[in-house]
Image: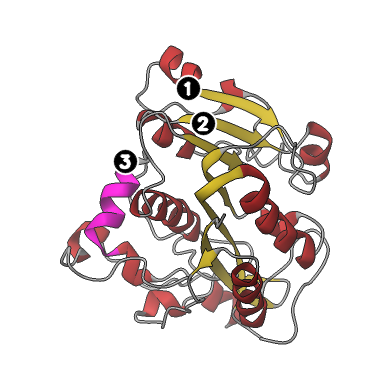
Amino acid sequence: MEELRRQSPPFLPDIDAMVGPAEAPFMAYSTCSTRDFYHPEFVRLSRLAGHEPFYHRKLWEWIFVLHHAFDKGAVGEGRKALGFGVGTENLPAVFARAGMRVTATDAPPEIGIAGGWTQAGEFSQGVETIPSLDMERADFERLVTFQCCDMNQIDPSLIGFDLCWSSCALEHLGDMRKGIDFILNSVEKTLKPGGIAIHTTEFNLSSNNKTMDSGWCVLYRRRDFDALVDEVRARGHEIEAFRVAPDCTVIDSFVDHPPYLHAPHLKLELQGYVTTSAGIVVRRGK
């Protein structure tokens, strides 16, 4: 019965058939929710980023970054964007297409190899490995540069950016505090005053007490996000309260178990915990 449950995902309606009104709230919560997939802006941004909409939390993370970057006014001709742990994401190309100068970074090779990212095809070792979407390659490489960056020790040369982002990378820095320190450093060391930092990571839905707090992956609890909001505000920056999306469909309640089906993959079981994606947006103060 357990194996049958694991291999029996819910019916997945066509996302285009389920799209609702444009005036409906979009990305109103901090955590991954099916309701966002049914918004026309999700569909538009997915295709802008070179993806057909599908029920996967990784796509939600990329759209979370794009939506808030545009919505907060961080995207524009001649502005500077910094991506951490970009791997083979399409986001650098989306921002370059908007006329931004993008510095795409990933971990130094020794960290990427140790973490298994090279085998998973999620590791970038140069600008040539980053997709350019429909941009001419020469135009892409004129606007996008690559640099190795240890997220635990951000290179002091990475300064003066209007936008920085990461997509599910900071939970792999060793422990929970290192992830929090990375968020704060990304705001205070790399951004201009008024610049926007957007980061996604793992959210523990199973417990507000027990969690994975160190090792190859950590899972942030509700209380950790609430504490982060308080710390960010105390340091003079702007951040909205952490809001957990209420489950609204059967798909929201489906948990993908190993070996993962990835259809749908909004929630998954990880080392005995149910987790999903969550995002935070910070505007740097003075």
The residue pinned by badge 1 equals 143
The residue pinned by badge 2 equals 102
Q: CA distance from mark 2 to mark 1?
A: 6 Å
Residue type indicated by callout 1 = Leu
Vertical order, 57 against 76 (above or below):
below
Residue drawn at x 27%, y 53% is 43
Which mark identifies residue 48? 3
Return the disc, 2 or 1, that comes first in the chain's sequence.
2
Q: Give the image quarter of residue 160.
A: top right
Vertical order, 75 against 269 (above or below):
above
Looking at the picture, the colour scheme in use is secondary structure
Number of other residues with Cα within 10 Å of mark 3, as a class: few under 14, some 14 to 19, many 20 or more: some
Residue drawn at x 40%, y 55% is 68
Q: Position of residue 74 (x, y in %)?
A: 41, 45
Return the disc, 2 or 3, that comes first in the chain's sequence.
3
Q: From which residue to which does the magenta span run?
A: 38-48
Considering every residue shown, the one lying at the far top of the view is 138
Q: CA distance from mark 1 to mark 3?
A: 18 Å
Return the disc, 1 or 3, that comes first in the chain's sequence.
3
Where, quadrant-wise, is the N terminus in this rendering?
bottom right
Dot 1 and dot 3 residues touching (CB under 8 Å): no
Where, quadrant-wise, is the C terminus in this rendering?
bottom right
Magenta stretch, main secondary structure, is: helix
In the rendered image, residue 256 lying in the magenta stretch gets the answer no
Is label 1 in a helix, a strand or a loop?
A: helix
Q: Give the image quarter of residue 153.
A: top right
In the rendered image, residue 47 lying in the magenta stretch gets the answer yes
